[in-house]
Image: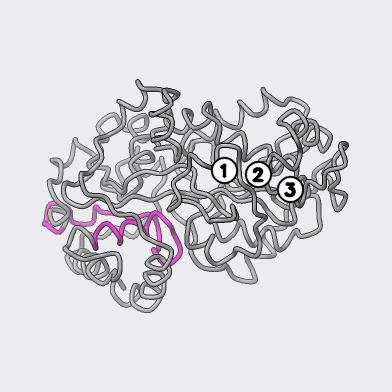
């Protein structure tokens, strides 16, 4: 993430505008399977719901290589180690050209790009999206269960494989330790020492990380994920105190000191140490807030075999350990620990997890999104 991509700030939870649709027309790329999705072995890759439909991994690989392309979107190379993951796929399958399109767009913009480019070889084959966007757009996804499906906790996957959690972490606060002492609890951020200093990644009605910041503030203020009002009240108080900094967070703003205190996922906050040696990260005691990003296949993917091969690749032991290398917690972590396939050194390097952790359910996420849409703007204006 050479700079923190706007995607960090804008993992959008609501649909974009019509103007955005026009802006997301993608340049044409060579190749692509188009509407002809039948593989060399006679399998219709677009309807395959598991590796068994292809027969073997070798047959899936052959079908994907025959397509020769993979269109990915919204994958910043500095986000949770995506750069190394993309490069490994390219090394493993040099016959497949990866088209890295619009790395900085949001989750909702990914869906807009799919709709705008439907039927074209420029459409994204796969998505990496937040839960609320996934819940709103299941008709855009093709069901697929990876070979390691049984290792993925039921709570972190849609039952038919329309979308599946992959990597995640805990909402944290990063801060410039040359300017501030470590906040011991979230209420410390309301103090006068933090005047004009505390940023969240965008608008929580539009951004997954900002949404999670309100979720964390909710549970840290004796609320529950059934009602985000305590979190909204906290940020309203933070704003009234003059401490809330309404500025987009980038690597440059971290390095320059413009955004000296930032709510973000722990694995993203931790990455700023390279930009500011004084940057430290705290996960508050008490109840922690965890979240996972999801993978999904475009139902109209121009390269459906390559899309499915990408999913198998992401949920392999090798790539699950690469999420870990990026500071994120892979969704198969528990099963890999039990199987002895986890990179234990990397696992041991993770920040200590809160003893009590909450993850929003689908219903809680939807309810919170509605409440934020009704109340956030007036609370912090």
Q: Which x, y percent locates residue 239?
A: 23, 66
Name the spot of residue 57 as percent of width and height, x first: 71, 31
| SS at circle 1 | loop
Residue for badge 2: 72
Which residue matches tag 1? 75
Residue 138, quarter of picture: bottom right
Is 260 above or below relative to 300? above
Q: Is residue 32 visible?
A: yes
Image point 78% across, 27% down: which residue? 95
Nearer-the-camera pick, 179 or 175: 175
Question: What range is drawn magenta here?
Answer: 190-218
Q: Is residue 148 left or right of residue 344?
A: right
Residue drawn at point x = 25 percent, y = 40 percent:
353
Q: Marks 1 and 2: in contact by CB < 8 Å? A: yes
Residue 360 highlighted magenta (yes or no): no
As helix, strand or loop, the secondary structure at mark 3 comes to loop
Q: Gap between marks 3 and 2, in whole Å? A: 19 Å
Give x and y (percent) for residue 380.
29, 71
């Amino acid at each position: 993430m050479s700079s923190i991509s706007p995607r960090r700030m804008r993992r959008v939870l609501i649909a974009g505008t019509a103007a955005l649709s026009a802006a997301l027309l993608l340049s044409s790329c060579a190749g692509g399977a188009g509407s002809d999705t039948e593989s060399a072995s006679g399998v219709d890759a677009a309807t395959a719901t598991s590796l068994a439909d292809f027969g073997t991994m070798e047959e899936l690989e052959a079908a994907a290589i025959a397509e020769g392309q993979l269109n990915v979107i919204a994958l910043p190379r500095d986000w949770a180690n995506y750069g190394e993951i993309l490069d490994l796929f390219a090394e493993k399958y040099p016959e497949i050209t990866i088209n890295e399109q619009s790395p900085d767009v949001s989750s909702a913009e990914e869906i807009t790009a799919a709709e705008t480019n439907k039927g074209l070889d420029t459409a994204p084959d796969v998505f990496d999206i937040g839960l609320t966007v996934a819940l709103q757009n299941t008709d855009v996804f093709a069901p697929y269960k990876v070979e390691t499906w049984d290792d993925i906790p039921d709570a972190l996957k849609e039952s038919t494989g329309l979308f599946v959690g992959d990597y995640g972490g805990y909402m944290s606060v990063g801060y410039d330790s040359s300017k501030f002492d470590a906040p011991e609890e979230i209420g410390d951020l309301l103090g006068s020492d933090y005047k004009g200093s505390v940023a969240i990644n965008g608008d929580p009605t539009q951004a997954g990380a900002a949404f999670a910041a309100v979720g964390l503030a909710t549970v840290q203020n004796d609320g529950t994920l059934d009602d985000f009002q305590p979190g909204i009240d906290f940020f309203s108080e933070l704003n009234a105190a003059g401490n809330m900094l309404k500025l987009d967070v980038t690597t440059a703003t971290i390095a320059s000191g413009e955004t000296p205190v930032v709510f973000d996922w722990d694995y993203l906050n931790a990455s700023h140490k390279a930009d500011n040696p004084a940057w430290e990260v705290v996960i508050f005691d008490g109840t922690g807030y965890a979240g996972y990003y999801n993978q999904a296949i475009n139902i109209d993917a121009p390269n459906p075999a390559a899309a499915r091969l990408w999913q198998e690749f992401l949920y392999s032991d090798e790539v699950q350990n690469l999420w870990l290398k990026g500071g994120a917690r892979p969704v198969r972590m528990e099963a890999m620990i039990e199987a002895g396939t986890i990179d234990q050194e990397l696992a041991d390097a993770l920040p200590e997890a809160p003893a009590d952790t909450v993850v929003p359910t689908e219903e809680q996420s939807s309810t919170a999104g509605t409440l934020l849409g009704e109340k956030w703007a007036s609370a912090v204006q």
